[in-house]
Image: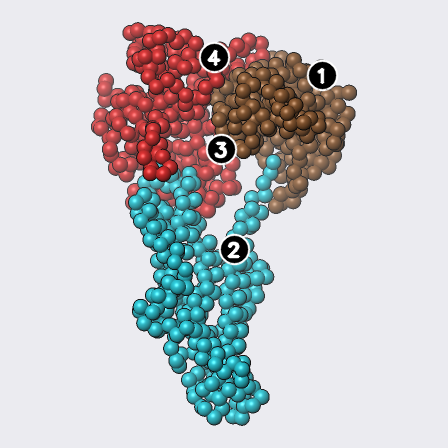
Chain colours: A brown, B cyan, C red
Amino acid sequence: MKPLEIRNLTIQYLTHRGWVEVVSHVNLDINEKNEILALVGESGCGKTTLGLAVAGLLPYNARVINGYIKISGKDPNSNSVRVAVIFQDALTSLNPLLTIGEQIAEIYIHHFNMHKREALEEAEKILSEVGLPGSFINKYPHELSGGQRQRVLVAIAIALKPELIVADEPTTALDVTTQARVLNMLKNIVKNQNIPMLYITHDLALVAHMADKIAIMYAGQVVEYRDKYSLFKQPLHPYTRALLNSLPRVDVEVSELQIVRGEPPLPGNFPNGCRFNPRCPLAFSRCFSEEPSVKVINNGFVRCHLYA
Amino acid sequence: MTRGLRELLMIKRIRYGISILVSLTILSLIVILSSPFEYDQISYNIHLLPFSRSNSTWPHILGTDSLGRDVFTRVLYAFILDVNCGLAVVALSGLIGLIIGLISGYLGGIIDSVLMMIMDIVISIPGFMLAIAIAAVLGSSIINAIIAVVIVTIPVYARLVRGLVLSVKENLYILAAREAGLSGLKIITKHILPQVTPIFITQATIELGNAILYIAALSFIGLGAQEPTPEWGLMISTARRFIREAWWPAVFPGIFMFLTILSFNLIGDGLRDYLDPKKRLSTGGLG
Amino acid sequence: MHSDILVKTISLKKYYEVRSKFLKRIIGYVKAVDGVDLEIKRGETLGLVGESGSGKSTLGLVLSKLTEPTSGKYIFKGVDVTKTPLKTFRGKIRIVFQDPYSALNPRLKIKESLIEPLIAQGFDKEEALAKATEYLKLVGLSREHLEVYPHMLSGGQKQRVMIARALITEPEFIVLDEPTSMLDVSTQAQILELLKNIKLKKNITYLFITHNLAVARYISDTIAIMFAGQIMEIGNKNTIFSNPLHPYTKTLISAYPPPDPTIQWLPEIPEDISSLSDHYEQGCKYAKRCPLKRDLCLKSTPELIEVEKNHSVRCHLYKT
């Protein structure tokens, strides 16, 4: 069974203007247990909603109206599935009144029916997996730095022995030097412990080194899905190209950034036809009237009339 | 402006409150303009008469009090008087409290510490005790009662406004306004006051009821309105002695006072609800 | 030659007092800016790069005259303006904040926020509105945007409004505090482009504060690397990247993943359990994290010395 299977998933949100579509007909897979699938996109693209859906954490004002998600063959909302989530904000994700040890131990107590003492021992062990000293089990969240708190969140996540980890912008709030270390740790955990990861981010540079497969999301749809090397070597979708070319770089001098006019549309305001057409430098007549369907290429697909 | 009013009127509590007030106001106007009785028309031979026993051409709808005065007329004159006194209290203490709160909240530092210390001292003395003390010192009259209640309630507004100012001050657009070169006064009037005003008005509406209660209570114990002024508290006080023979001169002032204060509380409560969840609904957050 | 220099700071310090809860006694200081010497030439963009806690935003607040330094001098156009109040500058020094969402009063129409700096200077409303329209066009918006409320605009559009609001008083010097950090990547590119164009058109000098070294590389002429309230390295952009000197600079550069999976990414991040504000009291502020530290580094604070033309570094590894 695949670690993650998403078929034709469509999700709506209830706003003051009624139900609006936020995720449209998404098809994605994670095929191997040590695979990282990156979901990349800008605001309003639906990546966070998709992540919440996979984690079984959709709020009450969201509904799935089409398709399904299966994690190792199970529904995300079922009791037997174990999906761990790592959010962006480590500060508010941790209880300031409990020690680190107690918070990690909670996982063992609740999910594995351990007694407190045993759970605390396991907690101490798992801290080394995330590069923290065992003595930290007695510390409180406010005593730790941002990067250390994020590591604790990862420890809590893997304590669950999850079938899948959903990480939503886990390093965005961290300094770049801390980010580098945390990314390294995350990658090692996936590869060494065989836990698949859905990595959600807006940072395309980061996924070049984190991910195995990359899905680019725009306005609720996956517009390109490729393996990492193919995507960067030959990006197909105009949006992917625009994203890549609008990145300033540290390693080389960039004389000009590609400017795409306009901004990503918000749910409820998606244009007709291809959702990228108001901004696409290569748009032609068909793009304005007809939604492009998915074109499969070796081990990937692209959603664009240029390739139909 | 009118859209806001229409939305306000959709709230049940506000509708009920306003209906009561409007009815009482109309009733009072009718009485003042066309009552066959004067509020101080004394006539011993018809004293303490309930409705059924009146014998003049016009009935005493709610009976007469211990001096033969028409209770109905007096109760509605008292409505006008008490509500106006309440308005005077709220206007004065509200204005002064607003200014203190704005200055204290915006300037901070020593000024804030001193002003708030004064406010704390006033608030630490039980309100009614302080009002009695002030009214006793100043002398028994309705004006002095108003002054006493004003002094007692200023801190309520000052602290409320100061708290609001402190939280609004945290917003980045206040720093941006400072950066743009706006003077403190302009920042207060343009950015802070519009956010303070709605909550301030809501509190003031609720405080109106309290003010009326204070005035009535002071008059009840003899420190506010004096005879023959038609004032609810005073009326109840005078009628207390005869309550076993005639309950109506004591009870009806109480009923009308209750209805009036209730209506202000309803309106204030409705206003508070109007201001709160509305903001949450209108943003319609998306994940 | 020296009239070229628009902004100059000498040993600028900004300390915040930490007071005890009870008697409000001073028990320590947060040394946000701890001795900064820099020069910005007219027409130049100085990219001030630092991670959180480096003091870069505080330095921005001091240079935009929103707060007074604790000690040191701030020299603007050759005049000591350390104690001069903001109003005296009449809009010649402005700031663009990081968060366009909170920088605009949500209850005011865009035009109200936009004309604020002019009203503060005594312009009448007619004139101010005319200028507002002109500057809206300059930043790529239109007259219609005057009448809308902030929540109707996107993040990028809001930031354009804030830029117009800064430009409207025809400043000579603008402090930009992470102006694109809260925007999408594609929007960031637009705003950076806009800032570049405006700078050329209006000959404005920028202090561009950012935590993102790549953005700094793109937009700056000169780059200053800040750590724990001090400038660790400062120089011409090309020189900094072709020849990074300070160990911190090298660490920073290596920490950025290149958007290309075929390039091997090997970040050189020293193992560090301490937090950013944790450094030795004397000596070099970076010593606690520095893999190359020596005894001297713990004892004395290195000076900022020019190692090559337009390239200075604060590190005991180097001599003039």
Q: Residue C306 occupies which quadrant of the picture?
A: top left
Between the residue at mark 3 and the residue at mark 2, the CA separation in whole angstroms equals 35 Å
Picture quarter with the C terminus of chain A: top right
Disc marking residue B272 = 2
Q: Between tags 3 and 2, which lies in front?
A: 2
Q: Between tags 2 and 4, which lies in front?
A: 4
Q: Secondary structure at mark 4?
A: loop
Residue at image mark 1: A32
Between the residue at mark 2 and the residue at mark 1, the CA separation in whole angstroms equals 56 Å
Disc marking residue B205 = none
Residue at image mark 3: C156
For label 1, count other residues whose C-alpha is less than 10 Å away and answer few (under 14), some (14-19) or many (20+). Answer: some
Between the residue at mark 2 and the residue at mark 4, the CA separation in whole angstroms equals 55 Å
The amino acid pointed to by label 3 is Gly
Q: Between tags 4 and 3, which lies in front?
A: 4
In this rendering, the answer to whether B36 lies above or below C211 is below
Q: Secondary structure at mark 1?
A: loop
Q: Position of residue A172 (x, y in %)?
A: 53, 25
Q: Quick check: do tags 4 and 3 share a chain?
A: yes
